Amino acid sequence: MVMGPTHAVSGALVGLLVADVLPRDWGGPTSTPEILAFAGVCAGSALLPDLDTSQSTVARSFGPVSQTFARGVGAVSAGYYNVTRGKKDRKRTGGHRTMTHTALFAALLGAGVSLLVAQFGRNAIIGVLFITLGLALRGLFGGWAKKYGWFIVTLVTAILSVLMWTTFPGEVGSTGLGVAVALGCVTHCVGDAITKEGIPFLAPFVPLRGRRWWEFKLPRAIAIRAGGPFEIMFLGPAMTLAAIGFALWSVEGVPDFVFGALEASGLSF
């Protein structure tokens, strides 16, 4: 699989880009804190599809609780795959890269989050922030998280979630966080699709040549090796720099300052 930090930073980058264009009616962020929270939720959600294996970053994020949950999700995913597989799909005992790596999972999870926020308001928001920001911390700051362990990560996540929560307006659209969660899951799937293994994004509803769990993947000549030199030396660092740049750009006042400086220097467009 693509490494956890790459998934998380790609989610953050996509979240920052989408936050800038997401319509207000769809829950688009309207302030710097909301934009950063949207990107953080997207970054954490970009790890969620790997909850089907106990070896993933997401499974280690909340200690024994997430480890146990990941084993359960893996078993359910394997069962779902075997029940819905086509005639030419091989039987599987493990569920990694099956149920949670599909468009259906992303859509249902995003819709579920939206419904929770619509029903329970700010109480649901802080729950979503706690889970996704905890995953984002584990993915983006893996070395720090490994050094201090899951308990400290959970404590810091709780504090950060409350701080983010207090920045939200009293009435917040339910759609925005659902979009961020679904977008993070889709971003994860795109990341896995560029590796040599691929992902069954349209399974099990679009059969192809007797298979319901066929994989989207790049030609082997251009597909990357997960955890290989290209990901470590180029892809990860490039996306990190881009995410930092867009995060700074999202801070209120920064675009006006930059354009003002360019205009003063005679370089305005």
Image (spheres, grey):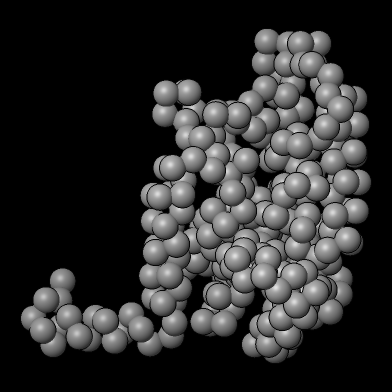
Residue drawn at the location 46% of the way across and 46% of the way down: 231
| Nearer to me, 169 or 12 | 12
Residue 201 placed where, x, y %?
66, 34
| Nearer to me, 215 or 153 | 153
Q: Is residue 149 left or right of residue 188?
A: right
Residue drawn at the location 8% of the way across and 81% of the way down: 266
Q: Is residue 73 left or right of residue 60?
A: right
Give the residue furthest to the left: 266
| Nearer to me, 167 or 221 | 221
Identify the image quadrant of residue 244: bottom left
Residue drawn at the location 49% of the way across and 61% of the way down: 13
Q: Is residue 257 left or right of residue 68?
A: left
Q: How many tags in the picture?
A: 0
Residue 125 placed where, x, y %?
77, 75
Compared to residue 229, the image places residue 111 above or below, namely: below
Compared to residue 221, the image places residue 68 above or below, namely: below
Q: Would residue 18 be visible to someone looking at this image? A: no
Q: Where's the N terminus, which quadrant?
A: top right
Residue 130 placed where, x, y %?
76, 73
Residue 217 placed where, x, y %?
55, 28
Q: Would residue 187 be visible to someone looking at this image? A: yes
Q: Where's the C terminus, which quadrant?
A: bottom left
Identify the image quadrant of residue 208: top right
Q: Is residue 76 left or right of residue 263?
A: right
Give the residue furthest to the front: 147
Residue drawn at the location 88% of the way across and 61% of the way down: 64
